[in-house]
C-alpha cells in the first residue's frame, strides 16, 4: 500500500501534467489558428474555423481522457524524445510529420484561400472530406486508448514493461494511429478546396509510410511477440494492400 507521501507526490505529478498539457494545447491552438488565418489574410473563412476548432477539440478531449485513464501515457509521450533509447532516425522524422509538415499545409491552404489559386470545390465534396477527416482522427484516437505504449517516438519501452498491443484497432492493422493520420491528410486538401495543399499533404503521407516501415521493422526485431502478431495481422496501414 503506497504511503501518504508517495500518493501526494503522484498527485503533484498528475497536476503538473495537467498544467503542461493545457499550456501545450493553448500554444498549439494559437499557432494553428494564427498560421491559418494570417496566411489567408482574413477571419471570415469557415473552413479554417471548422478545421481549427475540430482539431483543437480532438486534442483537448483526447489528452484529457488519457490523463484520466492513464497519466503515464501522457508522461511517456512528453518524455520519449529525450530518452537515450529513442531511435535517432525517428527524432528526425517526428518534427517533420508532426510540426513542420502540418504548418506548411496550413500556410499553403491559407495562401490558396487568399489568392484563389484553386477553383471552388463543392460543399458536398468538402463535407464528405470533413467526415473522412473525422473518421481518421477518431480511428487514430482509438489507437491511443487501445495501446498503453503509444509513444511519441519509436523506442522499446523496457522501463514500462513493453508488450504487444493487439486489441481494438490493432486487430485490423498493425499501425492504426498512422492509418488514421494518413486518412486525415488525404481528406484535408479536399476539405480546404486547395489543390496546392495536396503537395505537402502527400509528402507527409510519404513520411508516415517511411516511419511505419522503420517502426515495424524495429518492433519485429526487438519487441518479443511482435513477429508472431505480425503473422496474425498481416497489414501495416491499409487492409488488403499494405
Image: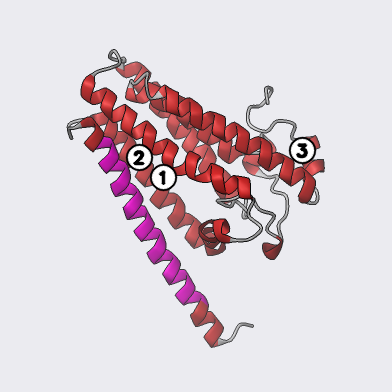
Q: Are marks 1 and 2 in contact (CB under 8 Å)?
A: yes
Q: Earlier in the sequence, mark 3 or mark 1?
A: 1
Q: Return the mark for residue 54.
A: 2
| Quarter occupied by residue 207 | top right
State whether the magenta stretch is mostly helix, strand or loop.
helix
Q: Which marked residue is nearer to the observer: mark 3 or mark 1?
A: 3
> What segment is highlighted magenta in the picture?
10-37
Q: Is residue 190 in view?
A: yes
Q: Return the mark for residue 230.
A: 3
Residue 21 highlighted magenta (yes or no): yes
Q: Which marked residue is nearer to the observer: mark 3 or mark 2?
A: 3
In the depicted structure, whether residue 226 falls above or below residue 239: below
Q: Earlier in the sequence, mark 3 or mark 2?
A: 2
Q: Residue at x 77, y 50 (%)?
A: 222
In the depicted structure, whether residue 42 falls above or below residue 34: above
Residue 95 highlighted magenta (yes or no): no
The image quadrant where one finds the N terminus is: bottom right
User: How much space separates mark 1 and mark 2, taking CA atoms?
Assistant: 6 Å
Q: Nearer the viewer, residue 184 or 70?
A: 184
Horizontal and vertical percent position of residue 129: 41, 24
Q: Is residue 159 left or right of residue 42?
A: right
Q: How many marks?
A: 3
Q: Is residue 132 in view?
A: no
Residue that mark 1 sits on: 58
Q: Is residue 163 left or right of residue 12?
A: right
The image quadrant where one finds the C terminus is: top right
Horizontal and vertical percent position of residue 234: 75, 31
Amino acid at each position: 500500500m503506497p504511503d501518504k507521501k508517495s500518493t501526494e507526490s503522484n498527485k503533484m505529478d498528475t497536476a503538473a501534467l495537467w498544467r503542461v498539457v493545457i499550456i501545450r494545447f493553448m500554444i498549439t491552438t494559437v499557432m494553428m489558428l494564427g498560421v491559418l488565418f494570417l496566411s489567408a489574410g482574413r477571419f471570415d473563412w469557415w473552413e479554417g474555423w471548422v478545421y481549427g476548432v475540430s482539431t483543437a477539440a480532438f486534442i483537448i478531449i483526447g489528452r484529457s481522457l488519457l490523463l484520466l485513464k492513464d497519466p503515464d501515457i501522457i508522461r511517456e509521450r512528453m518524455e520519449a524524445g529525450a530518452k537515450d533509447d529513442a531511435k535517432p532516425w525517428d527524432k528526425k522524422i517526428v518534427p517533420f510529420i508532426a510540426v513542420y509538415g502540418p504548418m506548411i499545409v496550413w500556410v499553403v491552404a491559407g495562401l490558396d484561400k487568399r489568392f484563389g489559386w484553386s477553383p471552388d470545390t463543392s460543399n458536398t465534396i468538402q463535407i464528405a472530406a470533413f467526415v473522412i477527416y473525422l473518421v481518421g482522427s477518431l480511428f487514430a484516437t482509438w489507437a491511443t486508448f487501445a495501446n498503453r505504449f503509444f509513444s511519441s517516438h519509436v523506442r522499446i519501452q523496457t522501463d514500462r514493461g513493453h508488450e504487444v498491443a493487439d486489441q481494438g484497432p490493432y486487430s485490423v492493422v498493425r499501425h492504426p494511429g498512422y492509418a488514421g493520420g494518413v486518412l486525415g491528410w488525404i481528406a484535408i486538401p479536399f476539405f480546404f478546396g486547395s489543390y496546392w495543399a495536396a503537395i505537402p499533404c502527400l509528402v507527409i503521407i510519404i513520411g508516415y509510410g517511411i516511419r511505419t516501415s522503420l517502426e515495424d521493422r524495429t518492433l519485429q526485431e526487438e519487441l518479443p511477440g511482435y513477429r508472431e502478431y505480425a503473422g496474425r495481422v498481416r497489414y501495416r496501414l491499409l487492409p488488403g494492400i499494405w
